Image (spheres, rainbow, N blue to C red):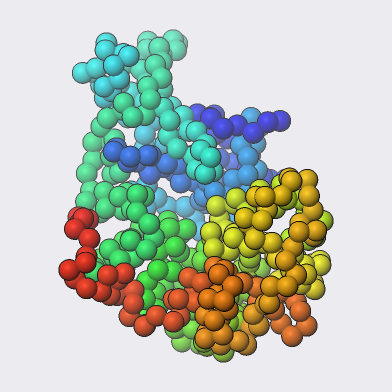
Amino acid sequence: MSAVNRVYAGRLAGLQVRGPDFAVIGRVRDVVVSIRPAGVSRALGLVVELFNKRRIFVPMLRIAAIEPSDITLVTGTVSMRTFQTRTAELTILGDLVGSKVVTDDPDYPHLQGKAVEIADIELERTRTRDWVISSAAVFATRPKFGRSPQLTTIPWKHIGGVSASGVGASSPLAETIAAFDDMRPADIASFIHELSPVRRNQIARELDDERLADVMAELPDDYQAELLEALDIERAADILEEMDPDDAADILQELPDTKAEVLLELMEPEESAPVRRLMAFEDNTVGAMMNPEPLVLTPQTTVAEALALARDPDIPTSLASLIFVVRPPTATPTGTYLGSVHLQKLLREPPSALIGGILDPDLPPLYANDSEETAARYFATYNLVCGPVLDADSHLLGAVAVDDLLDHLLPEDWRETGIRPDADLAPTQEVTRG
């Protein structure tokens, strides 16, 4: 069956959720959304009921396809924490359906000035794999017993009366967290860095796991450790799983050894294994700052396939700029490293060409025990934003990106002083700290 790109939330209720191996995980019971009255309102994830009746949260980005009969995930690994809504999160079926709202849609003047009731909400998938609220099915008058309501579909931008706090509700904290949707993680980190520890921890508890992981990666080391310590132990492990392994390793090295080991044990083995490998390298070496999950392919991969994989929004742009070619296995540490292909080279080749025939075998690699200075000279010499990291036996261990190198080379307090240490150069735009 073909995948669905537009669907009403009511249609999702009761659908089976399957892992990539098609094993049934549970059934959909609701959809969690973030409402932005002046921006794009997004679906954050699904509330899925397991066979033991526990309800868990599955992020929308974990969904591979929604089909008429079931939903397939891209991974069988999901958090087993019991679902609880956080500030600035609403559920469609639990909070929005049945609520009274208003509309200013010029196509339906007879509904303006009246309270209309939400019957269902339509979701649409974007090119970036996000699911956004596109419209609402509403009715003005509740029908008599036994009759169906006369529904009108209104574009979501013409629906009023719903805020990040809910229908007819207002919460400064909810509005602040909702405003983060339009901000980069580094800007959110700069914002919460200026808050008191109590306020900072409060916001951290209310952010979803993926967003909090992105924000924590942009905070100074001591602030990262402080936030992780403020979370309950199971959620702290989930946050570490959402982070890039190199960022997770940096945080864990700021914690006492006993606490770090407990967190590693709570993480899924496939998530903790690369973090443990990174923690084994000495500080200030390439191995300690590399990412063990670059884009690694075999020489039989076509240019078209390589480009499709490079488009994955979950891969940092720096790592997507260079494709590494190895003999199997492709999981790090890989088989023998053969060479690399730059993204720009792929764009100039026929889609059917094999990347094994166009790779650059002469680009020197970095080695895990190389120093930061060696890495800096490497990037300056070859004009790259990432480079391969090998062991002594020519196995690819990962890739180091120039942004991670700069993070280590800059003064420890560079995040606290910001990108413009001179106050006279500070941006004039201000963000209200609700």
In the image, residue 269 above or below residue 174: below
Q: Nearer the viewer, residue 60 or 395?
A: 395
Q: Could you tell me which residue is drawn at 34 percent across and 77 percent down?
A: 414
Q: Could you tell me which residue is drawn at 21 percent across and 51 percent down?
A: 172
Q: Nearer the viewer, residue 40 or 382?
A: 382
Residue 229: percent from left, percent from top: 40, 76
Q: Could you tell me which residue is drawn at 59 percent across and 59 percent down?
A: 320
Q: Could you tell me which residue is drawn at 65 percent across and 73 percent down?
A: 388
Q: Nearer the viewer, residue 284 or 266?
A: 284
Residue 41: percent from left, percent from top: 38, 39
The quarter of the picture where the N terminus appears is top right
Q: Is residue 382 visible?
A: yes
In the image, residue 146 above or below residue 257: above
Corner quadrant of residue 294? bottom right
The quarter of the picture where the C terminus appears is bottom left
182 left or right, relative to 267? left
